[in-house]
Image (cartoon, rainbow, N blue to C red):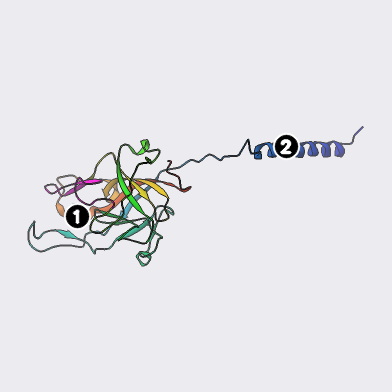
Amino acid sequence: MKTIAQQTLSFKVIALFLGLAAFTIACDDNNPIIPPVGLQAVTVQNLIADTIIGITPGVPPFGGMPYGAGKFTFYSLETNSIIPSTDSATNRWDLGFRGTTIISNSGSSGPGQGGAFVWTGLFADLKSIPADSTFRVDAAPNYAIPVGSGRSWYTYSQAEQLVRPIPGKILVIRTSSGKFAKVEILNYYKGGVTPAVTEPDSVKYKLQRHYTFRYTFQPNGSREF
């Protein structure tokens, strides 16, 4: 009769054998282990984009216009972080935000492999970048993401002094490293809430240029989301 110690050892040997057998089967070329890829949308709130510091003298259209310091906020979609302006000439960032202008790290804006185009549809429905898509690069003053009311992601009402994202406009981004992401601008005002039309312009100016957006980044280099 086997002792308890011998029985325990036998169980361990059997378990080890079964484990090795399972590992061998799983690693066989006909049964590759493919870990599931679950891409999550990341939401960025209150990203400052050259906030208003003054109003030009006079009245519109030649004066009375708000202005900032003229500086971009640089952002990495790959690392989900703000990149210092001292690195603006590097490939560390993917997008730059200044007022309603969004630049990509490409062409005249930076040394990266970036680019972009605007896709029309729901964020969740963009599961694969179409094979015939053309990524534009920046060539200031013309950018891959066009600037101007109704030209890409927003509309601007001069009468109301408000900027509103256009529903169903998705920014498809080729990052500085040549990978891909999709971005949806959700709001342009601090706290993610557009001021009421009745708010004074001074309040609208103070609250604007604070982006809320969501994005999905594909780290494996494919065009699938």
- Residue drawn at point x = 44 percent, y = 43 percent: 40
Tell me if mark 1 has few (under 14), some (14-19) or many (20+) residues whose alpha carbon lies within 10 angstroms of its own.
Answer: many
Q: Amino acid at mark 1?
A: Tyr
Q: Look at the image and tell me whether residue 6 can be seen.
A: yes
Distance (Cα) linking label 2 and label 1: 67 Å
Q: Which of disc 1 and disc 2 is earlier in sequence?
A: 2
Question: In the rendered view, does 214 fall on the left or right side of 37?
Answer: left
The verdict on residue 159 being magenta is yes
In the rendered image, which quarter is residue 84 located in?
Answer: bottom left
Q: Measured along the vertical axis of the image, is residue 151 above or below residue 65?
A: above
Q: Secondary structure at mark 2?
A: helix
Q: Secondary structure at mark 1?
A: helix
Q: Look at the image and tell me whether residue 194 can be seen.
A: no
In the image shown, does 119 or 95 lie closer to the viewer? 119
Residue furthest right as drawn: 1
Q: What residue range appears in magenta?
A: 144-163
Residue assigned mark 1:
205
In the image shown, does 188 or 86 lie closer to the viewer? 86
| Quarter of the image with the N terminus in it | top right
Residue assigned mark 2:
21
Count of numbered labels shown in the rendering: 2
